[in-house]
Image (cartoon, rainbow, N blue to C red):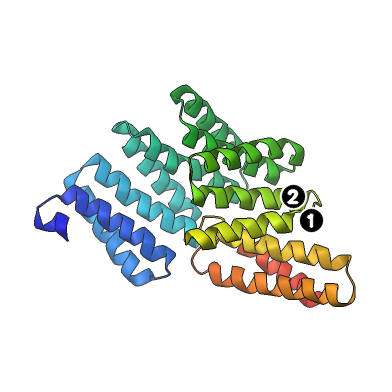
C-alpha cells in the first residue's frame, strides 16, 4: 500500500510477490493467485528486471509446492536469468538451487547432480557460503536418490553446518530432512531423531520448508522400520507414531506437495501391518 501511494511500482511488485509466496504456504490459494498475477502483470508492463525476477520467483515457488514441475523449472530459470542480469548473485543462487531438485523429481538425476555441482563451483569462485550450502544440499540429495549413500553423507553434513553458521533455520530444516532420509535408507534408526529435530526446528521457527512434507513422510517410514523389530507396547507406540506422522504429512502436502508419495507408501505399509 505504501509503495502504491508513492508510485514505486517495482516495490509494489516485490511486496505482491512476497505476499503471494506467504499466502501460498498458508494454503490461501485464491488470494495468493491474485497477488501472484498482479505482480507478474505489473512487472512485465514495467520491464524492470528486479521486478520481473521477483514475480517469476513467486510463480516458480507455487509450481514447486503444488507439483507443477515443468512450469516451476521454466519460472525458476526466468527468475534466475533476471537476477543474474542485474548482478544479484544471492537471489540468482536461491532460484538456481531449486532447479536440481525439480529435475531430480522428474528422474533426471545425473543432470540434477551436475547442476548442483556447478552451483558449488560458482559459490567457491564468489566465496559465498550460502550458495555453497545450497549446492551441497543439492549434491547430497541427488547422490541419495542415485543410491550413493556413502558419498551423499559428507555434502549433507557440511550443508547442515554451513546453514547453522549463517544462520538459516529454514535451510537447516531442509538439510536435516535430507540427512534423516539418508540415514533411513542406510538402515540407521538415528533417522528418527534427525527427522524429529528437523521438524522441531521448522515448528519453532514457524516455517514450512520445501522438504517439510518429506520429513514427516520419512518419520512415518522410520517408525514402521522400528515396528518391524518391536513387540507389544513398543510395537503399538511405533505404529501410532507412524500413523500420526502420515496424517501430518498428508495435511502438509496440501501446501508443500513433494514427499507425499513416500507418505502414502508408509500409510499402505501401516495398513498392511
Is 97 placed left or right of 43 in the picture? right
Q: Residue furthest top?
A: 125
Residue density around tag 2, few if under 14, some if 14–19, many if 20 or more, within 10 Å: many
**66 shown above or below 91:** below
Element carrying mark 2? helix
Pointer 1 or 2: first along the chain: 2
Is 77 placed left or right of 238 in the picture? left
Q: Which residue is mark 1?
A: 189
Q: Are marks 1 and 2 in contact (CB under 8 Å)?
A: yes
Locate residue 134, reporting x and y percent. 52, 40
Which quadrant does the N terminus fall into?
bottom left
The answer to whether residue 254 of the structure is visible from this angle is yes
Query: Which residue does the image show at 56% across and 52% down from the upper left?
Result: 173
Is 140 placed left or right of 130 in the picture? right
Locate residue 237, reporting x and y percent. 78, 74
Query: Which residue does the image show at 48% across and 37% down from the upper left?
Result: 130
Locate residue 55, reporting x and y percent. 30, 51
> Can you tell which quarter of the image residue 135 is in?
top right
Exactly how many numbered labels are in the figure? 2
Q: Which residue is mark 2?
A: 183
Amino acid at each position: 500500500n505504501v509503495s502504491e501511494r508513492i508510485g514505486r511500482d517495482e516495490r509494489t511488485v516485490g511486496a505482491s510477490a512476497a505476499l503471494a509466496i506467504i499466502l501460498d504456504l498458508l494454503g490461501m490459494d485464491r488470494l495468493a493467485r491474485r497477488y501472484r498475477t498482479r505482480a507478474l502483470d505489473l512487472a512485465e508492463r514495467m520491464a524492470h528486471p528486479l521486478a520481473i525476477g521477483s514475480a517469476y520467483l513467486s510463480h516458480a515457488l507455487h509450481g514447486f509446492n503444488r507439483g507443477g514441475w515443468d512450469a516451476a523449472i521454466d519460472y525458476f530459470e526466468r527468475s534466475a536469468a533476471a537476477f543474474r542480469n542485474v548482478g544479484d548473485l544471492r537471489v540468482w543462487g536461491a532460484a538456481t538451487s531449486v532447479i536440481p531438485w525439480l529435475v531430480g523429481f522428474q528422474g533426471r538425476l545425473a543432470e540434477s547432480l551436475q547442476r548442483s555441482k556447478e552451483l558449488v563451483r560458482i559459490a567457491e569462485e564468489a566465496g559465498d557460503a550460502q550458495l555453497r550450502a545450497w549446492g551441497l544440499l543439492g549434491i547430497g540429495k541427488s547422490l541419495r536418490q542415485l543410491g550413493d549413500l556413502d558419498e551423499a553423507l559428507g555434502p549433507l553434513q557440511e550443508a547442515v553446518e554451513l546453514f547453522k553458521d549463517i544462520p538459516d533455520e529454514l535451510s537447516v530444516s531442509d538439510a536435516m530432512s535430507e540427512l534423516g532420509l539418508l540415514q533411513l535408507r542406510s538402515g540407521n534408526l538415528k533417522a528418527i531423531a534427525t527427522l524429529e529435530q528437523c521438524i522441531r526446528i521448522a515448528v519453532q521457527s514457524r516455517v514450512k520448508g520445501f522438504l517439510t512434507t518429506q520429513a514427516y513422510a520419512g518419520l512415518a517410514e522410520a517408525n514402521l522400520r522400528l515396528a518391524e523389530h518391536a513387540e507389544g507396547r513398543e510395537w503399538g507406540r511405533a505404529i501410532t507414531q507412524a500413523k500420526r506422522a502420515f496424517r501430518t504429512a498428508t495435511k502438509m502436502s496440501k501446501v508443500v506437495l513433494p514427499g507425499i508419495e513416500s507418505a502414502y507408501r508408509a500409510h499402505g505399509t501401516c495398513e498392511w501391518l
